[in-house]
Image (tube, grey):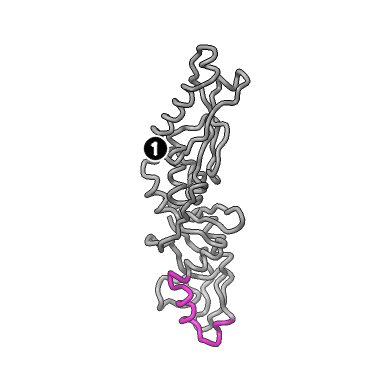
């Protein structure tokens, strides 16, 4: 999937002038006014991954419905960034020690997720899949809260997403102050600013500039780039072509 600029009227090559929607070039010898196409690079530069402190690990509070229905709030916090089998073991141990079950000789089998912490933008429901939560939580611990945002954007399903780390790494473009800041870096990395500078006489450089806001908006409208706003400012960006 690629981004393609709308076709502008061809400008007189001997009379270069600024365009409201800047034409990124594909070769350094092309002329101002030609039609261009910009594609997201496949070999993206490495991005910075935030590591979580111990106190920021995702966790869930799992409670026993048998106890709750008998007026007792019983359960425990469980670190979720572990294998699903380990989470199931903790849940079964918690249910086996149910005070209501011990008092009345019953068996506590039903449980629910009553609370959760440090899952960021990822949705956690009362009867969520333990496999799903385990994989999201491990991704958050490994890659930071950008993983939670990506999981929410992609409607993450653990039963379908076996290679989540690889998929996330391929999709994650990085953290930026804004989509426009990413667009500026992208155009610079692809050499389009250099192309523009070389195509124009030096005395015209300060009169002609790329419409970064328009280019950034078109990247988003095309669907090539997905974004998620960070709490406190900035955005996480993801390659949405796969």
Judge whether 195 appears above or below 67 on screen.
below
Judge whether 103 appears above or below 4 on screen.
above
**How far from the left and from the top, in percent, is residue 44?**
40, 61
Magenta residue check for 194? yes
Disc 1 element:
loop
Magenta residue check for 134? no
**How far from the left and from the top, in percent, is residue 112?**
53, 28
Judge whether 183 appears above or below 128 on screen.
below
**How far from the left and from the top, in percent, is residue 169?**
40, 53
- Tell which of 76 and 133 is nearer to you: 76
Judge whether 89 appears above or below 215 on screen.
above
Q: Is residue 30 left or right of residue 75?
A: left
**How far from the left and from the top, in percent, is residue 170?**
40, 53
Quadrant assignment for the N terminus: bottom left
Q: Is residue 216 left or right of residue 80?
A: right
Instruction: Name the residue: 54% across, 37% down.
Output: 124
Residue at which label 1 appears: 83
How many residues crowd mark 1 within 10 Å: few (<14), some (14–19), many (20+)? some
Q: Which residues are magenta?
A: 188-206
Instruction: Name the residue: 54% across, 24% down.
Output: 64
Q: Residue furthest top?
A: 105
Instruction: Name the residue: 58% across, 65% down.
Output: 213
Q: How many marks?
A: 1
Specify the principal SS of the magenta part: helix
Q: Is residue 145 left or right of residue 170?
A: right
């Amino acid at each position: 999937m690629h981004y393609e600029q709308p076709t502008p009227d061809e400008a007189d090559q001997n009379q270069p002038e600024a365009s409201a929607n800047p034409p990124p070039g594909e070769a350094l010898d092309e002329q101002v006014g030609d039609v261009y196409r910009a594609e997201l690079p496949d070999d993206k530069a490495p991005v910075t991954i935030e590591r979580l402190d111990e106190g920021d690990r995702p966790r869930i509070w799992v409670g026993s419905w048998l106890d709750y229905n008998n007026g007792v709030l019983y359960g425990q916090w469980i670190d979720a960034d572990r294998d699903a089998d380990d989470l199931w073991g903790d849940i079964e141990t918690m249910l086996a020690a149910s005070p209501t079950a011990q008092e009345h000789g019953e068996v506590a089998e039903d449980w629910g997720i009553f609370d959760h912490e440090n899952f960021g933008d990822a949705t956690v429901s009362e009867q969520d899949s333990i496999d799903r939560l385990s994989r999201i939580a491990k991704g958050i611990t490994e890659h930071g809260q950008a993983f939670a945002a990506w999981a929410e954007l992609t409607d993450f399903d653990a039963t379908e997403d076996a290679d989540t780390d690889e998929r996330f790494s391929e999709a994650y473009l990085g953290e930026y102050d804004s989509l426009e800041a990413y667009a500026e870096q992208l155009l610079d990395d692809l050499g389009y600013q250099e192309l523009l500078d070389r195509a124009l006489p030096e005395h015209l450089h300060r009169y002609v500039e790329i419409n970064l806001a328009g280019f950034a908006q078109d990247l988003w409208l095309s669907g090539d780039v997905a974004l998620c706003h960070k709490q406190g400012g900035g955005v996480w960006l993801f390659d949405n072509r796969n």
